Image (cartoon, grey):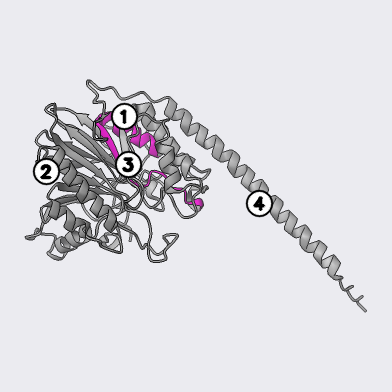
Amino acid sequence: MKKAKEKKTPKQRFRKFLKIFLIIVLVIAILCSIATVVTVIGTKSNANFISTLSSVEYSEQLVPETDENGYVTFTTDRDFKVLQLTDVHIGGGFMSTNKDSMAINAVAAMVTAEKPDLVIVTGDIAYPVPFQAGTFNNKTGAKLFAQLMEQLGVYWCFAFGNHDTEAYSYYSREDMSDFYTGGDYSHCLFSAGPADADGFGNYIINVKNTKGEITQSLVMFDSHSYVDGDIFGALWKYDSIHENQIEWYKNEMNHLQQMNNGKMPKSLAFFHIPAQEYRDAWYEYRDNGFNDTDNVKYIYGKAGEKNLVVYTGEHNYGFFDAVKEVGSTQGIFCGHDHLNNFSIDYQGVRLTYGYSVDYLAYQGIMKYGLQRGCTVIMVKPDGTFDCTGENYYQDKYQSAKEKEQVTMEDYNSED
């Protein structure tokens, strides 16, 4: 006969549980330590790569100053060149080191070749999503990008995106605003903006001619992150520019008009999450057989997201209506949808998606190159502008590291 098993006492069961628990804790601690070490090594490797890059060579670089009204201002009588970058998505963790290096390499190549007067990033510099980047630390990716721009010696600014400060990230928008304005990065022109407008990063950079006339105002907005209980963004319910930001915009443009001897200056707006009019414009164009309508004039590009979707904010607080009312802003630039890169005129206002940089966020996107690049915006001395989307894999963009091999097919071509 088999001997009956001795029944363990509660004390013995507790000891067994405690042993298993301590082993699990130890394993987690070891894994976390390994991840930390790998992250430090990877970050240092990318920082070292940045330190080897040469500064951009300008024949005549414009240096901004702060005018008597507190606005950062560039002064020139020639064309003013803006380079829009968007969705750079530097993870800054142990899982993203190689992809971060690719993003840094691409940004450096495009900025160096274009020699812009100003780089504007429309959101998502950092991407601290742990299951892809391997970190919750959103400052690491941001710091790498800021170091890159300082090394290149190019003036730049940005608008926050939804991923720059996730709910689970270590640092808030206020923390990151303090970081960017802390004095370590002399080429960063970001401003936290006024306290009476929601968010961080509602501010204006002006371009003037030598007569002191404002020829262009570049207006940055915080389009925030998520709404309607979607704290972690899992439901893709995005926010938009709020009512008090719209009031700030209207008041600012009226103030600039007074500064400009009663003449309303022309302006361009930059933010991350598209206004609903992006969707209205594209769907009207699409539903008309991809032909122009009375409201819509196609210029270039496409909606490359699956099913030609345009992901806008959930709510419309009237920003586009204010743009038409004020009569200053002639173009709007956003990011967010990495595969959408169209530029389209809607009711007299040009709506443009920037070409994205992303190697990390969309699954497998590092292997695709059709959507990756930048947007070149040329502002004329009379305040008019034009822009073009530029693909990164053109020969004119010579990178410090060899460019990765990619397919130039649509990301969704296999769906």
Q: How many marks?
A: 4
For marks 2 and 1, the one nearer the N-term is 1
Which of labels 2 and 1 is toward the front? 2
| Residue of label 4 | 28
Mark 1 neighbour density, 10 Å: few (under 14) some (14–19) many (20 or more): many
In the picture, the disc for residue 158 is 3
Q: Which residues are magenta?
A: 103-130
In primary-sequence order, the first of circles 3 and 2 is 3
Q: Is there a contact, CB below 8 Å, between mark 1 and mark 4?
A: no
Please state which of residues 238 and 290 is positioned toward the viewer in this rendering: 238
Alpha carbon separation for disc pair 2 and 1: 29 Å
Disc nearest the viewer among 1 and 4: 1
Nearer to us in this view, 186 or 307 = 186
- Camera-side residue: 406 or 274? 274
* Residue wearing tag 1: 154
Which class describes the residues within 10 Å of circle 3: few (<14), some (14-19), or many (20+)?
many
Q: Which amino acid type corresponds to the residue marked 2 in the rendered image?
A: Met
Q: Position of residue 220 (x, y in %)?
A: 27, 45
Query: Disc 2 designates what residue?
Result: 264
* Disc 1, SS: loop
Give the side of residue 184 with respect to residue 210, left or right. Answer: right
